[in-house]
Amino acid sequence: MILAPNEQQMWEKSPYKNNIRMSDIEINEKYESGEQRILTEMNREKLPSFVAALKKPGYMDVRPFYQRRTRWDETMQSRLIESFLINIPVPPIILYEKEFNCYEVMDGQQRITALRDFYDNRLKLTGLELWRELNGRTYANLPAKIRAGIDRRSISSIVLITESASNPEEAFLLKQLAFERLNTGGVALSRQEIRNCLYSGKFNQLLLELANNSIFAEAWGIPIDDEKQRNKNNLYKKMEDAELILRFFALRHVNDFRRGMEGFLDLYMIKSLNFTDEDVNILKNIFLQTINLAHQIYSANLFKPFDPTTETWKEKAYKAYYDAVMVGFSRHLANADILVQKKLIVIEETKRLVREDKSKLFTGGGRTHSDIKESIRLFDEMLSQVIAG
């Protein structure tokens, strides 16, 4: 199997330990040392001052790592302004101080964006319930006393100053845990949206790029040419399309699987922060070659398992089957021409494999480490036998 240079040693040193046994004395010493603890401070600032500070170069990264695919519409933004006007408590925003007086937004992106748009006169108030007479107005067009009333309001922030951990990997996991537990947005973030927020880098951008691959999108029913319909697609809205790409790259290392599927994907993202341009280009080519090969074999039935009960291919793609197909083909890219020549044999052997799948490994019957490893092994061996036959 082809690996990018930094993938070759990415699992050699992993500080994560399962089932750590420590005495009470050792646990107390760990607590007193401040390990795995986050320092915080509370701030409160008037809205005009807060928005003005956003314009200072390098002060605050509102969208530090990603562009969320769902955002507040003007009605939701307007109702936030109405909440300030009538003095309804607004949850604090959560900031992470990555450098002195330089912050990333961990929670509160939508609130900050709404305030910035409002004070920049880009938000025309709409959908207000108690102050309907203000609908259609921007900040500049509000009556003087209304503007003054809003300007007197404040926004609170909780700043995570630092995290203490014994190594960088544990520090990232601690930061992720804090993000997950502090996130209070109107729409709960999916696990991949959280990864997308926390683990920026070349590899994360690659996931988003490859999610737009036409073969991949069509196989998963994601309309990439119709933005309105695409925004309604559940896989797209929750960034599960990007997570599917991540699953492929991570499960190529299934022998190093740990911490369950979600935890394993988290670890791969953390380790991906060390990837170079060369690594990312190699990984991109691996994915494209793999999905092109799989599509040449299965065409419209790509990632759709064969159903022995009806003797037809299922109408939708399955994650467990996708994992096996993609990882399996990625291990045989050197023999792609042989597999294409033997396309009909591959298809018949795939049907046989699913017919013999009593545990429903390819349709999600089991998702333990052994299930995942076994489904990949079976598909891989099937391809090896076709090539050798």
Image (tube, rainbow, N blue to C red):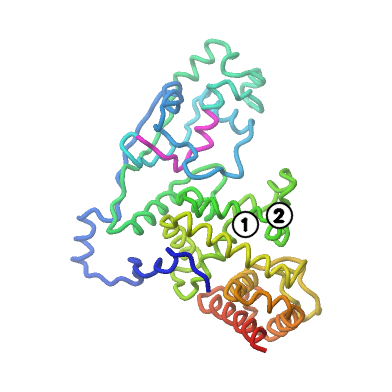
Residue 259, given in percent of the width and then of the height, sits at 44, 68
- Pointers 2 and 1 in contact (C-beta within 8 Å): yes
Q: Residue at x 71, y 44 (%)?
A: 227
Q: Is residue 360 above or below residue 49?
A: below
Residue marked by disc 1: 241
Q: In this view, does 112 lie above or below 365?
A: above
Task: Say which mark, if any, is on residue 222.
Answer: 2
Would you identify the image quadrant in which residue 272 lies? bottom left
Residue ranking furthest to the bottom: 389
Magenta residues (range): 102-115
Residue 199, given in percent of the width and then of the height, sits at 45, 51
Mark 2: which amino acid?
A: Ile
Mark 1: which amino acid?
A: Asp
CA neighbours of label 2 inside 10 A, class few (<14), some (14 to 19), many (20+) = many
Residue 328 among those drawn in magenta: no
- Looking at the image, residue 219 sits to the left or right of residue 39; the answer is right
CA neighbours of label 1 inside 10 A, class few (<14), some (14 to 19), many (20+) = many
- Looking at the image, residue 57 sits to the left or right of residue 134; the answer is left
Quarter placement of the C terminus: bottom right
Q: Which residue is drawn at 66% across and 21% down?
A: 135
Residue 109 among those drawn in magenta: yes
Residue ranking furthest to the top: 144
Residue 248, given in percent of the width and then of the height, sits at 57, 66
- Looking at the image, residue 313 sits to the left or right of residue 268; the answer is right
Which residue is more in the foreground, 291 or 100? 291
